[in-house]
């Protein structure tokens, strides 16, 4: 749905919005304007619309995080209960699942990006590259996400998972406000602006068929672990262009340090 001033006011408590609500709307927190002055040019998904209202209230950060976790828990429960799409339907829709990650040795220091791409129930394709002699963890994460978006753009449906909340917020939330303000923010310089512009522009074009979601790092998700190893390998081999890592056994990849 399109965000309106009336909708925003539905979520207001104590004449303000909390941090999680601001992230959903792509606003900086805390608000630097009054509620009546808030303007948002953004389409919200059903999940974002529901969460914005569920999060109404002067809530502690942990309480906000718990509400989001509870919502995801309920959504995943109902998703599992619903009928799963048939394998041939997935292939027909050309769905791809991409995990992306960045690594930095020093921060700032040597940096690299990695991806694990799952398609058609085959073993994942692993890519590593974007080596920088002096980069940061954030730049590495953003470059990995941009590469994931480029790959996703070639498919009819795609899901991208990153363990960088910063990268996701930059591309999926904050960029709408920054763009409206001439790519500037009241809090000062927008770091990594070039890659943010590229990524956001692409995301905005394909967001109806591509989801970008946060996943907790090092929590046992194979794709996340593989992308992490690839980001580290980019630093080890110092390759700027993306290369495919050929492997026979996933366990051997996970042993890379």
Image (cartoon, helix red, strand yellow):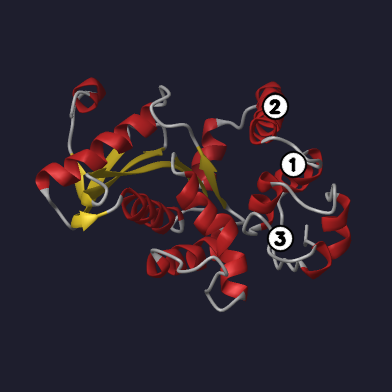
- Secondary element at image label 3: loop
Q: Gap in Å between the C-alphas at discs 2 and 1?
A: 10 Å
| Residue beneath disc 2 | 70
Q: Residue furthest bottom?
A: 182
- Secondary element at image label 2: helix
Q: Residue at x 70, y 27 (%)?
A: 70
Q: Does the image show residue 4?
A: no
Q: Quadrant of residue 257?
A: top left
Q: Which mark is residue 43?
A: 3
Residue 167 at x, y = what percent?
46, 51
Residue 71 versus residue 203 in the image, above or below: above
Residue 256 at x, y = what percent?
18, 28
Mark 2 or mark 3, whichever is nearer to me: 2
Q: Residue at x 78, y 57 (%)?
A: 1
| Residue beneath disc 1 | 51
Left-right relation of 67 to 84: right
Label 2 vs 3, first from the N-terminus: 3
């Amino acid at each position: 749905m399109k965000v309106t001033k009336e909708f925003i006011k539905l979520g207001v408590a104590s004449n303000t919005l909390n941090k999680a609500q601001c992230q959903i709307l792509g606003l900086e927190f805390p608000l630097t304007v009054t509620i009546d002055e808030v303007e948002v040019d953004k389409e919200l998904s059903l999940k974002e619309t529901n969460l914005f209202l569920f999060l109404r209230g002067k809530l502690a950060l942990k309480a906000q995080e718990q509400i989001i976790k509870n919502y995801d828990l309920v959504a995943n429960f109902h998703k599992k209960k619903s009928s799963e799409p048939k394998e041939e339907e997935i292939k027909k829709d050309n769905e791809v699942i991409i995990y992306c990650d960045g690594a930095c040795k020093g921060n700032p220091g040597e940096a690299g990006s990695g991806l694990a791409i799952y398609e058609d129930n085959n073993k994942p394709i692993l890519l590593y590259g974007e080596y920088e002699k002096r980069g940061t963890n954030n730049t590495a994460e953003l470059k990995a996400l941009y590469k994931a978006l480029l790959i996703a753009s070639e498919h009819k449906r795609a899901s991208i998972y990153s363990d960088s909340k910063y990268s996701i917020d930059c591309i999926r939330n904050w960029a709408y406000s920054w763009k409206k303000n001439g790519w500037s923010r009241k809090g000062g310089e927008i770091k990594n602006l070039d890659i943010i512009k590229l990524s956001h522009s692409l995301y905005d074009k394909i967001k109806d068929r591509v989801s970008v979601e946060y996943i907790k790092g090092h929590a046992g998700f194979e794709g996340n672990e593989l992308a992490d190893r690839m980001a580290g390998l980019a630093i080890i081999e110092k390759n700027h262009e993306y290369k495919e890592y050929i492997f026979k056994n996933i366990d051997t990849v996970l042993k890379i340090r």
